[in-house]
Image: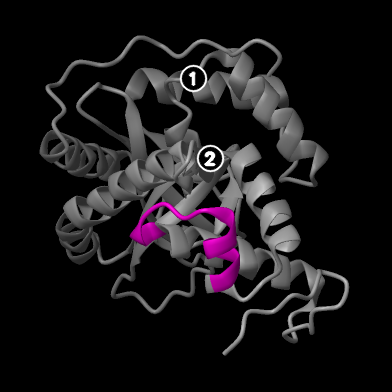
Amino acid sequence: MMASTLDDETEAPSGGGAGSQTLMRGLNIIEALADGSLPLTDLARRLELSTSTTYRLAAALIERGYIAAAPRAGYRLGPKLIELGYLAQEQNDLIQVARPHLERLAAASEDTVHLGVLDDGMALYLDKVPGRRRITISSRVGDRQPLTSTGLGKALMLDHPTEYWEDRLRADQSAGGFPVDAASWLERMRGYAAAGHAYDLEENEDQIRCVSAPVRDARGRVAGAISVSSAAQYMNDDRMAALAADVRDTARAISVELGWNGETAPPRRKRKGR
């Protein structure tokens, strides 16, 4: 098949709209460079695009660090992919290490167990092990939920300074989050940080409570968090207090497998301008 010489404005759409078509072409460039560097003309020929279209797409990818221009060799994969690959590997390792521990905790508690990480100011759910009770918990793997109303989110923030807690609370409240008294919420967060675990007291989902604890990496930093969630009827204050030790112990066991030596990293500092 001959390479296309059409520009963006005249190339036939693929059915996904201009935006998705551009995204797919950008991904095609990245995948084409996985086999090695290519000069512009060879890259355009492989993708069956005009050189002008290929150049514009490549320029955008270079700006974001996904590819780079190599003198005489053309284009190659960029440093952003190294960063993302490392993060993806870290997350995959976390899931693989944590899964057996989550299953044991779910079996022992008979309740639903979650694993999550901090993702751009939200709690990203990486894994979920359903419990034995006939309870519907709306969380799904891949969900991103507010930090300030979820047990996972609070556990993920335990090392952050008070200023970060306040910033997230304002942001979540502005987005229509569960209404809370800021002073009372901050006082609870200080208690959670001191205890090493956190609670969700029906703040994120009606009639659902949970107990959570942070998971640490080899540097002593919070790498993720786990939680046990159940209906409020099974989660009175006494049971939540009793579960806290089991959740902390499970989080600690996962942390040890990730290389944690028991030392906690210095408290995070608030970044300027954030």
Secondary structure beneath dot 2 equals strand
Please give the name of the residue rendered at 36% of the width and 64% of the height, measured from the top-left corner.
128
Query: Depth-wise, is mark 2 or mark 1 nearer the camera?
Result: 2
- The residue tagged 1 is 160
261, above or below 153, in the image? above
- Magenta residues span 34-45
- The residue tagged 2 is 69
Horizontal side, residue 133 vs residue 203: left or right: left
| x, y percent for residue 175 | 79, 44
Does any portion of residue 27 appear in the rendered image? no
- What is the total number of numbered labels drawn onto the structure image? 2
| x, y percent for residue 273 | 71, 14
Dot placed on the residue nearer the N-terminal end, 2 or 1 = 2
Secondary structure beneath dot 1 equals loop
| x, y percent for residue 138 | 54, 69
16, above or below 266, in the image? below
Horizontal side, residue 46 vs residue 192: left or right: right
Please give the name of the residue rendered at 38% of the width and 41% of the height, measured from the top-left corner.
82
The C terminus, quarter of image: top right
Q: Amino acid at mark 1?
A: His
Indicate the quadrant where residue 29 lies.
bottom right
